[in-house]
Each structure stands twice: as C-alpha cells, then as structure tokens.
Image (cartoon, rainbow, N blue to C red):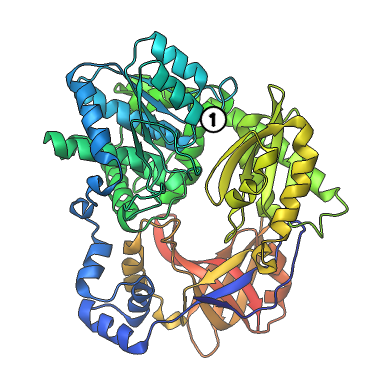
Amino acid sequence: MMTSNNNVQLVHSAIPITKRWLFRDLPEAQQVSALTCDIGVCPAIASLLAQKGITDFDQAKAYFRPSLDMLHDPFLMKDMDKAVRRLSRAIVQKEKILVYGDYDVDGVTSVAMFYGFLKTLQACAELYIPDRYTEGYGVSMQAVHWAAKEDFKLIVSLDCGIKATACIQQANALGMDVIVADHHEPDDELPDAHAILDPKQPGCSYPIKELSGCGVGFKLLQALTLQQDLSREILYDFLDLVAISIACDMVPIVGENRILAYHGLKKLNAAPRPGLKALMEIENLTSPLRISQLVFSLGPRINAAGRIDHASLAVRLLLAADETEAMHLAHALNKKNSIRRNIDSITTAEAIAMISANPHRGQAKTTVLFKNNWHKGVIGIVASRCIEQYYRPTVILTAVHGKATGSARSVAGYNVYQALSACADLLDQYGGHAYAAGLTLPLEHVTAFQQRFEAVVAGSIADELLIPPQTIDLPLVFEEINCKFYNVLKQMAPFGTGNMKAVFVTENLMARSYYILKGKHLKLYVQQRGSPHVLEAIGFGLAHYEALVRVQKPFRMAYTIEENTYLGERNLQLHIKDLQAM
C-alpha cells in the first residue's frame, strides 16, 4: 500500500515533469525491533527488510546470501516433463534440433545459452534468429519451411512462439515437433505445440510468473540436467547470460530471478566469457558490474546487432571462445551501436517535435506517432524517450513492407497490452507485456488506431498514473548515514525492477552551497536543521530546482545513497531523485 500526499498536476510538456511522491507503509515498530535484534542490524535496515516481507533470520540469510540450491523444481512448470522427454530423445537419437529465438537481448541470450549448452552434449543443433526486416518478430513461416527443407525434427522456440499458432501448425504438418519456451502473454487459443513452457499459460502452477525468456529456457535446461544427471556446473556457466536477460527485459529481480541475477553477476564479474569481456574492455567497464551497467551499456550493444543489421553477430560474440575473435566481433558490434545511437537521436528529435506541434497534446492521454521512413530498429527506444519527455502510454509506428509496424511502451501502473487487446480488430498481430509490446496493422488503419487507442486509454487510466511516481521507502535523518549503514545497504543488490535501491526522504534541509554543472545538473552541500552533518548530493538533470534551494527555505529531498570515487578517495554521496518545498 502506498499513499500520495502532494497535489496531482497533469503535465504533458517537456521535462521537468512534476512527480507524485508515494510513501511505502512503514512496518510495525514491534516487528522492526524484533528483526533488529534477530539479525543485528540498525532499525532502518530492519524496516527495509520488513517492507520486503523478511521477518526472521532465515529469511534474511536467504535474501543476503541467495543460493542456487533454492531454485524451484523446474518440473513444477506445466509441460516440462513432455518437453524434457522430447529434447532428450532428440539428443540421444542425434535428431537435428533448431534453436530458434527472438532478435532482442532476451532472445539472443536465450539462443546463445541454449545452443551453447546443447553443444557441450554434442547434440546435433543449429541456431536461427529471424531477420527483423524480412521476417519480423517471432516464429516465421520462412524459418519453418527452411527447417523442414534442412531436415530438422525438433524446433525449440525461445522468447517467442506462444502466439505462433499458424507457424507451429505448419511445422507439425511438415513433420517437425515444436517446444515453445516463452514468457509472453498467451492468447485464448494456444498453439498446437508438442510442449508449451510459459508460466503465464492457463493451468501452469509454476511459482514465478515473471521469468525472462532466457529464464524459461534455463528452466528447461535445468530439468534436462536433473533428468540426465548432468553436471550442474556446466549449466551454471551460462548464468551470466541469464542475468543479462533478466536485467534488460526488466523482469522483477525477486525470488528466483534474484537468485539467478545474483549468481549471474558473480559469474560475469569473476570470469566473463570472451565476448562479454571484450565489450567490457571497449566500454572501460570494470568489476564489479551492476545491473544498471547491463541495462545501459552491455544490453544496448547486444541489441544493436538486430536493430541495425542481423542479431547473429551478437550470438557469435556471446559464443566466441577465442579472445581475438571476440574483440573483433565486439568492435563490429560497437560500430552498429554507434549507428543505432545516431538514428535514435534523429528519430527522437523528430518525434518530440511532432508531439510539441500537436495543439491537442495537453488533453491527450496517449501518444501515437507514425512516420513511414522511421527506422524499425529504434522505434521501441524512441517510444521510451517520448515517455521520458511526455509521460503517457506511447506507440511509435513506421512502415515496413506495406504495413504499419511499431512498438508500444507504457507508464507505471498501466497495462498497455490490454489496451492493445481492445484494438485487436484493427491489428494484424500484437504481443508483449504489460509495459512493452509490439504490433502490426494495415496502413489504412493507422488513424482509426490512433483514435481507438486514445479512447481506450482515456477510459481506463487514472489521471494520477499520468504523473511519474517517486516511491519513498523510508524517512531518514542524516545522523543515520555512515559507512557501516551503506555497507549493509549495498548487500541488498542486485538492484533492479522489483528490488530497487532504497529511496529515503529527509526533511528540514537547507543548502549550504550549490552549483549548477554543465547547465543541467544540480550539486548541493546540504544540512539538516539541528544537525552538524553536511552531506554532498548530486541531482542529474535537476538544475531547474535552483530557485528552490537558493531561497534558503527548508525543503525535503528524496534520494538514494551512493559511493562516489574521486581521485582515489571514496565518499558517500546522495543521489537526488526529487526535491519538494516544505
């Protein structure tokens, strides 16, 4: 339960956008006191743990020291037994197995992991990733016919396939079996696959519904490992790829996902595979890597291959065994990413200009933009950029092969997939998640879709959801902030969706001094009234708060606590999320 205590203001203009502060419920004092004594932490840490549902020593130990022994039994997933039997038969009988996956980070890591593992078993496997521009998303009819011609007997579709009814029917007719290992929302009608692994399908009792696509593929390999009594260490060697998929697909880093991400990061930091090591060197990334660096540095480069050219380049990089080859591929991938960034910047500028020029944008609850020459590979990124500037559900469309195709992104708390479902009669196809989806429709339906999507969202979204939220976990006084506190705090990593860094609020603050950096960032030396402690704080992109801190009146600050290293010295620094006058 969260509550908001500031006035809601609908703002559809460029940054800065007013935020609504949401305060998490504070746990009961008795519960905090008991946990403080039980595990020997300060009350603030105990409160954060209690908010996560951690109430005793054993739960705290499992949280701070995630163990691979705590992974769920993969056979709890519906159809897992059927999938393992069919995959085992194909391996033993040397049938040709086609490892098929999507062209984004989740799909690429899925294919690299699954294919790489099968090769350790000397399986007769090949991999296939569709071309974004000639085949489109998901299982393609072109791939099915190619697989039949090449005498494949089994297709394993990773991070896609749950909606590939016609293609899987055709595969069956051509004498091939299909195992679907997906995590996207299914339709009412499921494809007639030999086995479907998707925690979101009806009748699946698997405890975790929000696995990444790579995570579902990992569970299939885990089940195979158990059934065949194979070495778990061989499988665990691929956890770095699972961690990248979890980070970049924004699945919640809780429960089993947190265990996988934790150990995947350990693998990545201790012994990165040559391809990832080469990318890290190009980007000057040093251990220990954090989830945010996977999202904003490694992920975009892996994604760039499929956005600009073909995702097979990224798979080759992730599977590279030779460091010289890996470095060559990493440089090629980095060049693709530079091209992507340039296209991204140009397209985003055009999209923002179109929104700004719309006289009705102040009343609109959505953004739906179409331009026939936008690059298909960047429209998802552009949709996210538009939400950063104009906070509302957004669809960016372009023309490909005589159709309008696009990406949808949503705001916190609103299910854009359901909104697209209400427009299904105007669409040729759509699929995805609550916050990100893809769609294709006839060009002549674009205007009708814009109108329908606006009407659907306007009729179903609460006005407050059009204001970006700022969640506050806990109030804190500056005396509580020290190195010991921070050292425990950082052990709550890996941080990401579902397990974000704790955001604190401190009131009655005064700026002892401030600086505007590069015209857009705010740096403060801030003191709490009645306290001698002065702490350094930085607010990226928050220069517009200069007037608030200049007037020497008390304000309150929402922030995270970071460690800043400068000239070899490490100091605690507050990372400002937002400021409010008191």
Q: Where does residue 186 sit, x and y in percent of width and height?
A: 47, 43
Side of 404 relative to 284 (left or right): right
Front in this rendered view, residue 84 or 508: 84
Front in this rendered view, residue 6 or 43: 6
Find disc 1 in the rendering and name its residue. Answer: 137
The amino acid type found where label 1 is placed reads Tyr
- Quarter-wise, where is residue 224 in the image? top left
Q: Residue at x 36, y 37 (%)?
A: 196
Q: Is residue 474 above or below residue 349?
A: below
| Residue occupying the far top of the picture | 149
Q: Where does residue 428 sit, x and y in percent of width and height?
A: 64, 33
Front in this rendered view, residue 382 or 103: 103
Q: Residue at x 68, y 45 (%)?
A: 423
Q: Is residue 72 above or below residue 123?
A: below
- Quarter-wise, where is residue 461 in the image? bottom right
- Secondary structure type for disc 1: loop
In the picture, which quadrant includes the C terminus?
bottom right
| Residue occupying the far left of the picture | 229
Q: Residue at x 70, y 63 (%)?
A: 17
